[in-house]
Amino acid sequence: MGNWRFDEVVVIDLEATCWDTTAEKEVFISEIIEIGVCLLNVLTGEVSKPRGLIVKPINAIVSPFCTSLTSITQDMVEQGMAFNDATNILKKEYGVSRKIMAAYGNYDQNMLKIECERNNLSPTV
């Protein structure tokens, strides 16, 4: 199967902008603000290359509620990278186009697909 690697899995954990009230949730759109990533060797259980990629949202702001849940602040995301730059790191440094990806639950998978579509990227990253 080409250059596919099945002995390593790319594990991601996303953080996205969020709000406390229903009214805020109806007004604002969630955007990824951090991609936590590492490699998991499925043969040994060894975790390598852990990293947190802080992403600057296009439209959303980090609410105080979001900061209380994630510890990520508006100042942090303003210094963050574009989502496209983060996905390039996932491709080049973690080989996501050649490895299985795993995340905790469907939320991260769905959010990654939405963010890729929003940024005109292939949802396979």
Image (spheres, rainbow, N blue to C red):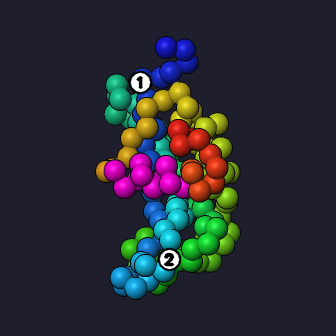
Residue 124 visible in the snapshot: yes
Q: Position of residue 106 (x, y in %)?
A: 34, 50
The residue tagged 1 is 7
Q: Amino acid at mark 2?
A: Phe
Q: Quadrant of the C terminus?
A: top right
Q: Residue furthest front?
A: 26
Residue 77 vertical position relative to residue 52 in the rendered view, above or below: below
- Between 24 and 37, which is closer to the camera in this rendering? 24
Residue 26 vertical position relative to residue 54 in the rendered view, above or below: below
**Which residue shows up at 36% across the image and 82% down it?**
22
Q: Position of residue 54 (x, y in %)?
A: 58, 61
**Which residue shows up at 48% across the image and 29% down it?**
99
Residue 52 visible in the snapshot: no
Q: Position of residue 78 (x, y in %)?
A: 66, 72
Q: Secondary structure at mark 1?
A: strand
Q: Amino acid at mark 1?
A: Asp
- How many numbered marks have been drawn onto this rendered protein structure? 2
58 lies left or right of 103: right
Q: Position of residue 108 (x, y in %)?
A: 41, 53
- Between 85 and 93, which is closer to the camera in this rendering? 85
Q: Residue furthest left?
A: 105
How would you rate the neighbour count of disc 1 (Cα within 10 Å): few for under 14, some for 14-19, many for 20 or more?
Answer: few
Queried whether the magenta region covers residue 21, the answer comes back as no
**Which residue shows up at 49% across the image and 14% down it?**
1
70 lies left or right of 124: left
- Residue 28 marker: 2
64 lies left or right of 104: right
| Range of magenta residues | 106-115
